[in-house]
Amino acid sequence: MKPLKDHLPVMPLKPQKNPLEAKTTAFPSKGTGMNVEDVFPHYIRFAQSQIPGFSIQPAYEAVVSTLLAYFSGDTAACQVKGIRLDKGLFLMGPVGCGKTTLMKLCQAFFSHKPFRMMTCRKISQQFAREGYSALLRYGSQSYRIKHLGYGPVLLYEQPITYCLDDVGAEPSAKYFGNDCQVIAEILQDRYEEFIHRKMMTHATTNLTTEELQQRYHERVRSRLREMCNLIAFPPSIPDWRR
């Protein structure tokens, strides 16, 4: 079997009608409270069906185990790992270590915990084109919509979970000459919705904690800590794209 490093760049996953409905023949698509040890082999088989030759190298085992404990709802394993199920995930690690790949695999495999992925770069580009409506879409108005006779209505009991991919890599954005720290604004809006309506947020970044504080200041960094579980890759993991 080829090592994981030979396959991490192979993305996106194989096309499916709806990746959030992806299933394996042996893994339940709904329900929580599953045992991470039972889920692990099914996850590996699913990953191998998407990325031929996929395998978990020793340096990845702790991270993958934590991700599976969280998404499978294994409360005992999460308690041991210090993971809270009422918070999102924040994956930190060097460039090319597989953060996005692993989150996309979890997105497709755990259909009972759906979330949407969007790169921070694309969000910043949307702001430059559309203005502040882009901030609302990913921030304070990130809820499912019901269309009624008199117009669309936000369903505040159904917040949309987003994974903001590559936080800190987005360019600075302007709209009609107005500068805006797009991702910082969205994170602060989602924090408010997390406090009031339990809106969940996942994120990935190549930045260190010090670089995050320098880019977004202590206020945003503190709120990220409050609404997300930090999962850090070992800093020695190389860039597998090379």
Image (spheres, grey):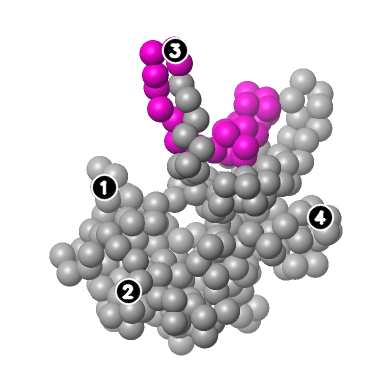
Q: Nearer the viewer, mark 2 or mark 3?
A: 3
State whether residue 236 appears in this view: yes
- Residue 138 drawn in magenta: yes
Task: Kindly identify the amino acid type of the residue bearing the numbered disc 4.
Answer: Arg
Q: Does label 3 or label 4 sit earlier along the sequence?
A: 3
Work out whether 89 lies above or below 143: below
Report the quarter where the N terminus lies.
Answer: bottom left
Q: Nearer the viewer, mark 3 or mark 4?
A: 3
Q: Nearer the viewer, mark 1 or mark 2?
A: 2
The residue depicted at 45 percent of the width and 16 percent of the height is 151
Disc 4 secondary structure class: helix
Disc 1 secondary structure class: loop
Q: Does label 4 or label 1 sit earlier along the sequence?
A: 1
Comparing 145 with 237, the one in front is 145
Name the residue tied to disc 2. Answer: 34
Name the residue tied to disc 3. Answer: 150
Magenta range:
125-151
Name the residue tied to disc 4. Answer: 219
Disc 3 secondary structure class: loop
